[in-house]
Image (cartoon, grey):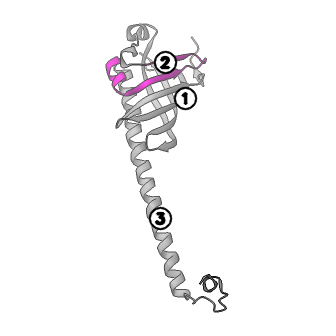
Amino acid sequence: MHSRLLARNDNPPPSLGRPAVVGFLTLVVAVWMSVTASAQDDDRQHETEARAALEEYFRALNAADNEAIAAVSNFPRLSVGSNGQVVLRETPEEIAIDFEAVRQSGLDHSTLDLAETVHVSSDKVHFRIVFTRYAVDGSPITTMPGLYVVTRQDGHWGLQLQSVLPPTFTREP
């Protein structure tokens, strides 16, 4: 019974022919391109949503609105300063920037000068950023690079990690 299964077959397999092979390869490439295009569309959508959260963070910061900053954040939220200092905020209530002290220091607003997407996944986008802080008279005070990570938690895109490097420009007093 098993000897038939193991018996040698000297007959070559039937040839598919060039048109069949070309058709099969065309189908494989079309499916691959469709899957790739769909994944790229998904990445673009995730990037767009994450970028909107990043831009909203800067709007809330410039509006001196701690509640809006908390609303566009995901928790726990980690900040790593230019000197390596680490601040961990576990809850939205821990977002408590003293904007009066910030204004008294001479800072008026910040601009997001660059937000380059570095990595994208379905629930996280890494941005290489550069921002500039300005005085009330509109003159630049400092320009700083950094890495901001925006995540999606329960469908909500928010800033979860900000790491800032030392300034690339600082105005002399």
Residue 98 falls inside the magenta stretch: no
Q: Is residue 65 visible?
A: no
**Amino acid under label 3?**
Met
**Regarding mark 1 in the picture, which secondary structure is present there?**
strand
User: Disc 3 on helix, strand or loop?
Assistant: helix
Q: Which mark is residue 146?
A: 1
The type of residue carrying mark 2 is Leu
Residue 122 x/y as whole percent? 43, 44
Residue pushed farthest front? 1
The mark that comes first in sequence, 2 or 3, is 3
Chain-order first, disc 1 or disc 2: 2
- The mark found on residue 33 in the picture is 3
**How packed is label 2: few (under 14 Cα within 10 Å), some, or many (20 or more)?**
some
CA gap between label 2 and label 3 equals 43 Å
Where does the C terminus fall, quadrant-wise?
A: top right
Q: Which residues are magenta?
A: 65-90
Q: Which residue is mark 2?
A: 88
Residue at image point 39% right, 43% down: 48
| 41 is higher (above) or lower (below) than 85 | below
Label 1 packing within 10 angstroms: few (<14), some (14-19), many (20+): many
The answer to which of marks 1 and 3 sits earlier in the sequence is: 3
Residue 146 sits in quarter: top right
Instruction: Calculate the distance from the C-alpha at mark 1 to the C-alpha at mark 2.
Output: 17 Å
Q: CA distance from mark 1 to mark 3?
A: 35 Å
